Image (cartoon, rainbow, N blue to C red):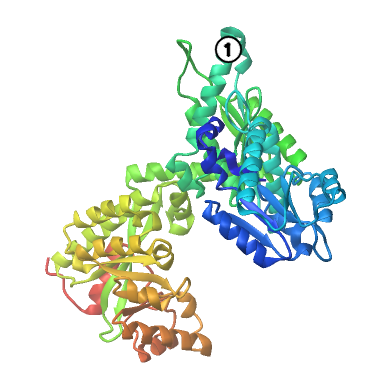
């Protein structure tokens, strides 16, 4: 439930100065069988600065919409066919999660009986039809203001400024309802300050309160940091921290990879708790124990989820404190395995355990190797050679991928420069750039790594995915133009699996597109796939783009692609990705050249 979204402030006390701004963010739901009236009212309220509206003409859908998207305030017509406003008001006030929503009744009736009945059912205020716009604005502002302060008193902890248990449980109820509806997951983390009672008894209750305030600030700040956001993809986690009671804090993680996200966040929180706290001139050191339970694996109700989270916290304390534990042993083990892998990845960067393999790219006209795609591998000291399948996802979530990507592009370009100097040919090298590398603060470092190799950048092709171009298209174009100015060409990787829009092929400064192997697998046997591939090649050539097909596994696929004019092909039919020395021998044999170096 929104509770006026007042918790968007850093601290609830901020609403004294910012309340008039925050009120404009309120979600306003109107239920009325007169759509023209709703349009007029919305237009007026938009002029007043309000921006979030849900309009419902069919009153039979009202409760379903209310449960799915609970508003901050409801404007309710009384006289509607099939389901009238009285019935909706009765249901709203009897629903545990909706009963606190203020309801302004819209009515053309002037008799006392109608108003009395609406008041008995829980109406907050009245507006007589026809609606006076100025009066509507005043009633709306006053009602929302009262709600905001009521929410602050009812749902926030006066000591720390964080949401309290009531607010947290309210959110958890809604999170579980949505998880059930969308078959999603929800995680609850419970953080207990280790030996808080000893500190409280030694330094006194006032010092204990100061410590709790500093802990609350530190926890809120911890989940704002970009490294946590890069793990989870969430930039509003701080909104879901609550102080339940005493020295207990909780975090709600609705949706997504809840168990995995909570493991990363738990690590972060344990880390920030270890810094010194200065309380009335005393240096205080504390640790925390964190318990985590996940719906639906560990529990299916609010009460059982909270109970199991507490049990996991107690287990963490028994394990020696200053650690986190999942209620589920399997999830616990998997989360720790991933964190262990992240730790090993960090070490691998320092120890340079990565290697680059090269998959040949064949020119269909000359049948010779014209270049290669650089693909990273991890030479794990215990597990052997690992493909990206085993570690790229973790590298992305841990924010390590830009560093790995910079090393790969430097090494690939450096190696290609060596081959060129040896006379292997003017081979072109393709390197995939991750979405994290494509943002402004990383792309400059990526390009600097490539340039430091000494290779002429005209031999470099940077591959990006379709999804990286969507959203802020102007920014993407600026980044791509910046890359092109330094010499490299640009290629769209896995074309056909995303937006595949002709408009972006025209807008973006591209040189090449790469047809995803999913379309190649069934050619030439499937007519539909043949038609798609043929159309992609024709479209690309009409835009003066080169076409690469990947995933070639047999001679029939090769013959088809050569027949429709595909420019470059790669796949296991020619060669798997090879270590540098084997790739060199492959090129020498296929291109029948001699190394002069």
Circle 1 residue: 206
Q: Residues within 10 Å of mark 1 (few under 14, many from 20)?
A: few
Tell me what residue is drawn at x 64 percent, y 48 percent: 135
Q: Nearer the viewer, residue 178 or 94?
A: 94
Q: Nearer the viewer, residue 189 or 1?
A: 1
Q: Nearer the viewer, residue 574 or 440?
A: 440
Q: Where is residue 345 shown, x and y percent of the image?
A: 42, 45
- Left or right, residue 290 beside residue 113: left
Count the labels in the image: 1
Q: Quadrant of the N terminus?
A: top right
- Left or right, residue 323 beside residue 143: left
Q: Where is residue 317 shown, x and y percent of the image?
A: 64, 26
Q: Where is residue 276 shown, x and y percent of the image?
A: 45, 20
Would residue 373 be visible to someone looking at this image?
yes
- Left or right, residue 564 beside residue 220: left
Q: Secondary structure at mark 1?
A: helix
Furthest toward the left, the residue is 596
Tell me what residue is drawn at x 50 percent, y 85 percent: 529
Q: Where is residue 376 shown, x and y percent of the image?
A: 36, 58
Tell me what residue is drawn at x 34 percent, y 49 percent: 403
Would residue 555 be visible to someone looking at this image?
no
Q: Quadrant of residue 173?
A: top right
Image height of 467 relative to 551, above or below:
above
- Left or right, residue 85 beside residue 460: right
Q: Quadrant of residue 106?
A: bottom right
């Amino acid at each position: 439930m929104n509770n006026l979204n007042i918790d968007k402030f850093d601290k609830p006390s901020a609403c004294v100065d910012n309340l008039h701004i925050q009120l404009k963010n309120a979600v306003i739901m109107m239920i009325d069988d007169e759509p023209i009236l709703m349009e007029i009212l919305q237009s007026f309220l938009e002029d007043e600065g309000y921006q979030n509206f849900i309009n419902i003409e069919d009153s039979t859908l009202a409760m379903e919409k209310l449960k799915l998207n609970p508003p901050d305030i409801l404007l309710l017509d009384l006289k509607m066919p099939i389901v009238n406003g009285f019935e909706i008001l009765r249901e709203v006030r009897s629903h545990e999660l909706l009963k606190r929503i203020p309801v302004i009744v819209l009515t053309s009736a002037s008799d006392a009986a109608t108003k009395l009945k609406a008041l008995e059912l829980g109406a907050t205020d009245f507006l007589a039809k026809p609606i006076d716009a100025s009066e509507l604005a005043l009633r709306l502002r006053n009602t929302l203001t009262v709600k905001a302060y009521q929410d602050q008193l009812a749902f926030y902890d006066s000591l720390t400024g964080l949401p309290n248990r009531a607010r947290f449980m309210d959110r958890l109820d809604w999170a579980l309802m949505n998880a059930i509806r969308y078959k999603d997951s929800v995680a609850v983390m419970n953080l207990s300050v280790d030996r808080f009672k000893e500190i409280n008894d030694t330094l006194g209750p006032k010092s204990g309160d100061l410590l709790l305030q500093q802990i609350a600030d530190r926890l809120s700040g911890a989940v704002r940091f970009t490294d946590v956001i890069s793990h989870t993809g969430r930039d509003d986690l701080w909104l879901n921290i609550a102080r339940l009671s005493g020295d207990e804090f909780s975090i709600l993680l609705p949706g997504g990879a809840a168990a995995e996200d909570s493991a990363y966040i738990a690590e972060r929180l344990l880390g920030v708790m270890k810094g010194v706290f200065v309380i009335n001139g005393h240096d205080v050191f504390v640790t925390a124990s964190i318990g985590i339970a996940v719906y639906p694996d560990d529990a299916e109700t609010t009460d059982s989820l909270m109970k199991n989270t507490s049990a996991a916290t107690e287990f963490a304390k028994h394990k020696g404190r200053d650690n986190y534990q999942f209620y589920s042993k399997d999830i616990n083990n998997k989360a720790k395995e991933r964190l262990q892998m992240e730790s090993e990845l960090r070490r691998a960067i320092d120890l340079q355990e990565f290697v680059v393999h090269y998959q040949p790219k064949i020119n269909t006209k000359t049948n010779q190797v014209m270049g290669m795609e650089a693909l990273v591998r991890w030479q794990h000291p215990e597990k052997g050679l690992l493909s990206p399948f085993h570690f790229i996802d973790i590298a992305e979530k841990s924010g390590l991928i830009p560093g790995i990507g910079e090393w790969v592009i430097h090494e690939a370009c450096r190696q290609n420069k060596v081959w060129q100097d040896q006379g292997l040919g003017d081979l072109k090298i393709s390197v995939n750039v991750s979405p994290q590398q494509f943002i402004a603060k990383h792309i400059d470092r990526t390009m600097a790594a490539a340039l430091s190799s000494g290779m002429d950048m005209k031999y470099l092709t940077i591959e990006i995915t379709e999804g990286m171009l969507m959203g802020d298209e102007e920014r993407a174009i600026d980044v791509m133009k910046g890359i092109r100015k330094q010499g490299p060409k640009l290629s769209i990787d896995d074309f056909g699996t995303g937006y595949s829009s002709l408009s972006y092929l025209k807008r973006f400064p591209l040189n090449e597109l790469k047809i995803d192997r999913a379309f190649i697998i069934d050619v030439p046997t499937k007519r539909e796939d043949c038609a798609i591939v043929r159309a992609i090649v024709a479209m690309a050539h009409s835009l003066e783009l080169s076409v690469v097909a990947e995933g070639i596994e047999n001679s029939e696929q090769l013959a088809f692609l050569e027949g429709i004019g595909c420019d470059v092909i790669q796949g296991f039919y020619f060669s798997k990705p090879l270590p540098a020395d084997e790739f060199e021998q492959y090129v020498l044999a296929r291109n029948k050249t001699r190394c002069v170096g």
